[in-house]
Image: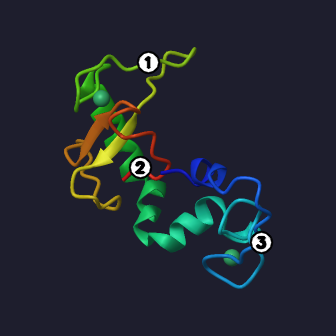
Amino acid sequence: MSIFRQSQNTGLRLHVSSCRYCSSPALPGTDLCEAHTGEAGRLLFNPKRAGYRLKAYRIARRAAIRRANGHCEKCGAKLKRRPNRSVICQTHHKDDDPTNNPLDGSNLDVCCLDCHSGSRSPT
Ligand SMILES: [Zn+2]
Ligand SMILES: [Zn+2]
């Protein structure tokens, strides 16, 4: 679930909270301070996310996308494409470990955004 979607439920109530990771004031509608929004905060929350920065991940992802051949490997739906023809998809780590990236893409499922529920933290 995305932070943005959650924050809409807090409604009009003026609510100042502090950051989930430190004592700095949180940005409006979030529980994260400026330093902990975005990738820095997600990394703290799940250090294995560092795996997304590995070259092996990028190679494995490319191999998995080639294997998927334009279709979601969960539901079989045809994947949409960006104007530059690259497919819009998310890759799911079968063992939930983003640092485990065999170069043949065998630990990855290529998913449409529906199957990965539009998650902003694709594992
Ligand atoms: Zn913070
Ligand atoms: Zn799907």
Of the image marks 2 and 3, the number of the one nearer the N terminus: 3
- Where on the picture, by quarter, is residue 72? top left
Q: Nearer the viewer, residue 32 or 50?
A: 32
Where 18 falls versus 68 (above or below)? below
Element type at marker 2?
A: loop
User: Does residue 27 appear to the left or right of 107 in the view shown?
Assistant: right
Mark 2: amino acid: Pro
| Residue 52 placement (x, y as % from top left) | 45, 55
**Which circle's residue, 2 or 1, is located before the other in the chain?**
1
What distance separates the C-alpha of mark 2 from that of mark 3? 29 Å
Please tell me whether mark 3 sits on a helix, a strand or a loop: loop
Quarter of the image holding residue 24?
A: bottom right
Q: Can you identify the residue that label 3 sits on?
A: 16
For disc 1, the marked residue is 80
- Look at 58% across and 47% down and name the residue there: 5
Nearest to viewer (mark 2 / mark 3): 3
Under mark 3, the amino acid is Val
Queried on whether the Cβ of the residue with tag 1 lies below 8 angstroms from ligand 2, the answer reads no
Rendered residue at 59%/68% (across/down) = 41
- Amino acid marked by disc 1: Lys
At x 49%, y 71%, the residue is 45
* Residue 17 image position (x, y, % from top left): 72, 74
Badge number at residue 122: 2
Closer to the chain start, of discs 3 and 1, is: 3
Q: Residues within 10 Å of mark 2 (few under 14, many from 20)?
A: some
